[in-house]
Amino acid sequence: QYLRHLEAEASQATKYTLAQYRGNFCTGRYVALELTLGMMTQISLPEGRSPEVLCNKLVGDDSGKFVVHSCPGSAATGCPLHCDGCHEDMVKHFAVGQCTDGWMLFEGDVCTADNADCISKNKVDVGLARWCNRWPAPGVPVYKVKDAEELDPPAE
């Protein structure tokens, strides 16, 4: 009995919830995403949502802050071991309980049946994995500089 209690307590300590609020000040209603510290988790989003398979991993650092890694997976192969190929970095760095531009990381499961502010759990791409293939890769120019001939080609 005591061992089960310790296992449940340890399991709960690794569970987190990332909330995305409608505004930037982390008040009112929000959508939530469950995360497990140090573990890549796979979620199948509802039909019509993108990506179809959502992969998320929460990693802690030495300062007590956390980084959320989010990327698309596939129905055939599931989730990758890491999201290094995804360069989207808007929804990444968090301290527990601190509002960051409308996102907040909580310890444990805060999206429970008696919490009316949480309007959905694990049904929205809170970590913005859908932007992975639209985000510029580091070191790759976003714009190509054109010379005068490219802007105004000579008439033929």
Image (spheres, grey):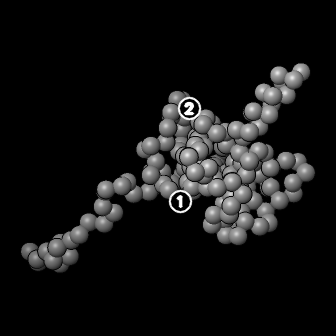
Q: Could you tell me which secondary element the residue under label 1 belongs to?
A: loop
Residue 90 image point, x, y percent: 53, 59
Q: Which residue is mark 2?
A: 78
Q: Quadrant of residue 12?
A: top right
Residue at the spot 79% in from the left edge and 62% down from the top edge: 29
Q: Residue furthest left?
A: 156
Q: Dot 2: what SS?
A: loop
Alpha-carbon neighbours of circle 2 within 10 Å: few (<14), some, or many (≥20)? some
**Horizontal and vertical percent for residue 104?**
69, 58
Q: Can you say whether 143 is above or below 118 in the image?
A: below
The type of residue carrying mark 2 is Gly
Of 17 and 77, which appears nearest the observer? Answer: 17
Tag shown at residue 90: 1
Which residue: 81% across, 28% down?
A: 6
Distance Cα–Cα, label 1 vs label 2: 24 Å
Type of amino acid under label 1: Met
Q: Residue at x 70, y 70 (%)?
A: 25
Tell me where residue 61 appears, x and y as whole percent.
56, 46
Q: Residue at x 58, y 43 (%)?
A: 59
Marks 1, 2: nearer the viewer: 1
* Label 1 Cα neighbours within 10 Å, binned few <14 / some 14-19 / many ≥20: few
Q: In the shown orientation, is residue 18 left or right of residue 50?
A: right
Q: Is there any visible trace of residue 32 in the rendered image?
A: no
- Whether residue 73 is visible here, answered yes or no, is yes
Specify the label residue 45 is tagged with: none
